[in-house]
């Protein structure tokens, strides 16, 4: 099951700025709040990716119990609550409580020095 990011209460508007691109760690994930809406931003190769920071298993933030949620190889996001695992490239659940689920992807783009929700 995957919810569209716009189905979440308090989802930001299309066009909203998430962060500056330089704030996203080269080999990590940036967790930000956009008016109390939790978002994960990361680079997957040269592409920027963003997901709602809510594990579909119980809708808790992936980084609630641990700050580092990206696997050592950069290929997976790991929920710190119940070890659900998701592909970083598309948010698909691949192990644990993540099987059959997916993170809600947010379409983003780089404009100038910032990362914005498309639209």
Image (spheres, rainbow, N blue to C red):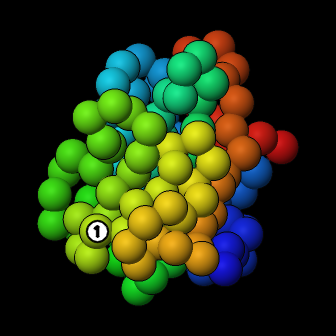
Viewer can see residue 110 = yes
Question: Quick one: 100 or 15, which is closer to the camera?
Answer: 100
Residue at 23% across, 65% down = 80
Does 33 appear above or below 15? below
Residue 60 image offset from top left, x and y in percent: 36, 77
Does 65 appear above or below 19? below
Indicate the secondary structure of the residue bearing disc 1: loop
Q: Is residue 110 left or right of residue 26?
A: right
Residue at 32% across, 64% down = 79
Quarter of the rendering containing residue 102: bottom right
Image quadrant containing the N terminus: bottom right
Which residue matches tag 1?
83
Does 9 appear above or below 28? below
Question: Quick one: 102 or 95, which is closer to the camera?
Answer: 95
Question: Quick one: 67 or 119, which is closer to the camera?
Answer: 67
Viewer can see residue 55 = no
Residue at 28% across, 68% down = 83
Within-10-Å neighbours for mark 1: few <14, some 14–19, many 20+: some
């Amino acid at each position: 099951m995957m919810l569209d990011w716009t189905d979440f209460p308090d989802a930001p508007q299309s066009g909203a700025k998430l962060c500056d691109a330089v704030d996203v760690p080269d080999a990590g994930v940036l967790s930000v709040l956009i008016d109390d809406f939790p978002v994960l931003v990361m680079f997957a190769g040269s592409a920027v990716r963003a997901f709602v920071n809510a594990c579909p298993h119980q809708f808790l933030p992936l980084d609630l119990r641990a700050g580092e949620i990206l696997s050592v190889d950069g290929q997976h996001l790991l929920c710190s609550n119940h070890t659900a695992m998701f592909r970083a490239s598309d948010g698909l659940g691949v192990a644990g409580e993540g099987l059959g689920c997916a993170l809600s992807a947010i379409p983003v783009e780089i404009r100038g020095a910032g990362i914005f929700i498309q639209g």
